[in-house]
Amino acid sequence: MYNMYGIPEASTELGWTIGLPLLLMVLLFALAVPVWVSLGITAIVLLMATDVLPLTLFGEALFSGIDAFALIAIPLFILTGDVLVRSGLSNKLLDVAEATMGSLRTGLGTSTVLGCGFFACISGSDAAGAAAVGRITIKRLTDSGYPLPYACAVVAAGSCTGILIPPSIAYIIIGLVLGISASTLFLAAAVPGVMIMISIMITNVIINRRRGYEHSRAQFSFTRWGKAVWDGKFALMIPFIILGGIYSGIFTPTEAAAVAVVTTIAIGMIQGTLSLSDFPKMLESSAKVNGVIVPIIAFALPLAQVLSALEVPQTFVQGITTVTSDPTLIVLMMLGIFIAAGCVMETTPNIVILSPIMLPLAQEIGMNDIQFCIFMVTSLGVGFITPPLGLNLFVLSGLTGQSVLGIARQAVPYVLSMLVVVLMLAFIPEISLWAIPEHLR
């Protein structure tokens, strides 16, 4: 098998032989050709045009790239999120969040964001969180005085934590591509993910105070909070099992995902909120989501290997450092690339294509590999609430009938607050690395 870092080096200058296939890929994206098809065509054209590697590599890399134990976690976490919704456990998590934050003046919006964070601790997916939390909370938010477009923006922004708070599918993928343990990345991502969630909460509080959307005057009640926690004890147990097992070393992320699926199904069956008749729909729904992600990974890996063999990452680094050697400017350029990429393409292809190209540039300015992964995924997470793609925007638009651009306009303050955290992650390494033992850095 050819390895992304083990392929023979090739000295090939970036000319039209490489540029035209890459332009073709952009054109195919613009024509709405499926991402995995676009990536596959580009990889084959590059192999045929450059002869840098044998064409037989494509078929080999296509299957060997997804023959990875870590990838099993992706469908399992997706299925866990679906079971969580169908069994009603997601409602319990939101009840706990509302009992915790609901007494604040802007409590319902804040508790909605906290609920998104709870859901992120289990599902590892942002779109699933946006759909699940949106169905439950949008009406509550509008009844409390929030305009519908803004209520959608709150849920869309809060659901960005789906790929930022561990366990996260995005960190599993970037760990696979760059050869970094997903458990290590989960440990590093915990604080940054929570920081993003808190920044969204603070932004909602500031906007609420200025616009007067919500005027909750309910007093915090330990009795109500205790009842909500007791009623939701099984739902709260799941993230503790997942994260506790991973961080303590009892489970690998894949094993934790399997335990999570079994646990949520068992709880649903015991409580009577899940029946055998629900399984076909759950499996079908999860298979559809997984069927989008895995082909992209499969076809993006050969393309990444070809680009590496053509020394595109090295050439890219040389080109950037020729323009400027200022680390601050380079970080800002990387951030701009990630946000632009996140605006037009899903996280999975962005990670598989861009991470091998951008990592050498990050290393050139002294950025730690783990810090780079956290910085990149968090930057791409901003793309979930920025048009034209903005997946969370489309999910909420589909749920409510509001226009994507109308929701996007209301989400602008959240984009800005998330960018503040992203910049902190870029320039303060210890935020990402403080929990990582020295020998794992």
Image (tube, rainbow, N blue to C red):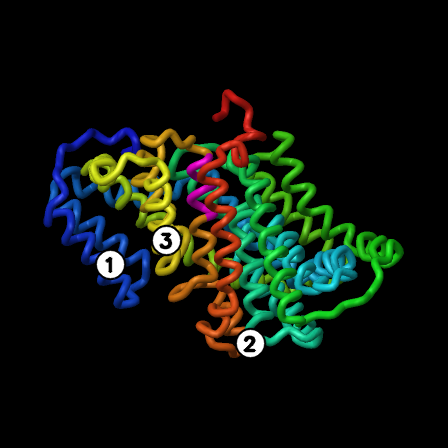
Indicate the quadrant containing the N terminus: top left, top right, bottom left or bottom right: top left
User: Between 365 and 363, which is closer to the camera in this rendering?
Assistant: 365
The first of marks 3 and 1 along the sequence is 1
Please state which of the two labelled residues, at mark 3 or mark 1, is closer to the viewer: 1
The numbered dot on residue 400 is 2
- Callout 1 crowding tier (Cα within 10 Å): few <14, some 14–19, many ≥20: some
What secondary structure prevails in the magenta region? helix
Q: Are marks 3 and 1 in contact (CB under 8 Å)?
A: no
Q: Is residue 349 left or right of residue 310?
A: right
Would residue 265 appear left or right of 53 to someone viewing this image?
Answer: right
**CA gap, disc 3 to disc 2?**
30 Å
Residues in magenta, as a range: 371-378
Residue sitting at x 16%, y 45% = 47
Sequence-wise first label, 3 or 2: 3
Tell me the residue at 83%/55% (across/down).
225
- Say whether disc 2 or disc 1 marks the residue closer to the N-terminus: 1
Label 2, label 1: how far apart the Cα atoms are: 31 Å
Percent x, y of residue 322: 20, 37
Which type of secondary structure does the marked residue at label 2 adopt? helix
State the residue position of label 1: 26
Q: Quick one: which residue is furthest to the front in this view? A: 210
Which residue is labeled 3 in the image?
Answer: 295
